[in-house]
Amino acid sequence: MHQNKRVLLDIKSNLSLVAHEFEFECIHLQTYLEDSIALLKQANYLSPDAKLYSIEADKYFWSVNHTFYFTSSFIAMLMQISEDLVNRCCEEWKIYLGGNLMIKTSTDPFYDKFRNSLLSKIQLDLKSPKWVELSELYQLRNALIHKNGKLSINEKPERILAVQSLIKKYHGLEIIDDQIIIEEHFCKEALMIVKRALTYLFKETSNHINILKRSY
């Protein structure tokens, strides 16, 4: 068997394992999201006669504050998982393509590591809605992490446009007084955005490997 063909088979096998890991990851993330939100919702009602410093009031304010922190951290966790999987995919392709293919050309890691290695070879459509939404979600993540969820008119234009685009398409995400508000529903949507994008990635990668194998 031609050496390059064997390398391609190894890459396909390894990426297949990564894809299966991701499927299980999505199942666990869905369960984690539902269980965590259910716990927070146990204390999200405040009766009209509740005292300010009562246990009921303390639980209510704890629920409100921690729901905000939880939904924000869930988005950040999703993007960390996404970036890790993209990196693993690129590392596999480096074996076949050779050389240093991780040249930084953009502030967006999904246009950085991936475009300079894999995308340039398999012609993955960067304008695909699946991939565009993943990049938009990353811009949202940046606002949550670097700006504590603030999105003012002085923010980077690409970040504002990305977040506004997500708001138009999905419920559970809004901006109130420059503060990004994320609800449970959008967390579920964000998980689906990541799932669609990475499923697309794995599918196109597999297709391209099949095309390359036929040349040996």
Image (cartoon, grey):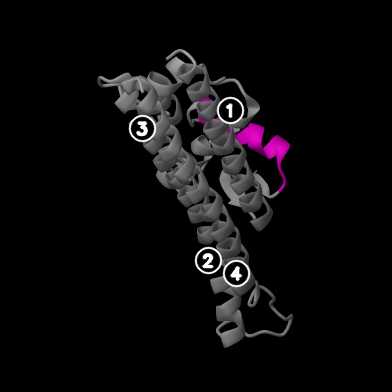
Residue 49 spot, x, y in % from top left: 72, 85
Name the element at disc 2: helix
- Quadrant housing the C terminus: top left
Q: Which residue is mark 3?
A: 92
Residue at which label 1 appears = 132
How far apart are the two marked residues, 3 and 2, measured between alpha carbons? 39 Å
Q: Which residue is mark 2?
A: 66
Magenta segment boundaries in residue numbering: 158-171
Label 4, label 3: how many angstroms apart (C-alpha)?
35 Å
Task: Give coordinates of residue 3: x percent, y percent.
Answer: 31, 22
- Mark 2 or mark 4: whose residue is earlier in sequence: 4
Say what amino acid the circle numbered 4 marks: Asp
Spatial distance from mark 2 to mark 4, Cα to Cα?
Answer: 14 Å
SS at mark 4 in the image: helix
* Nearer-the-camera pick, 1 or 179: 1
- The question of residue 167 being in magenta is answered with yes
Reading the chain from its start, which is encountered first: label 3 or label 2?
Answer: 2
- Residue ranking furthest to the front: 1
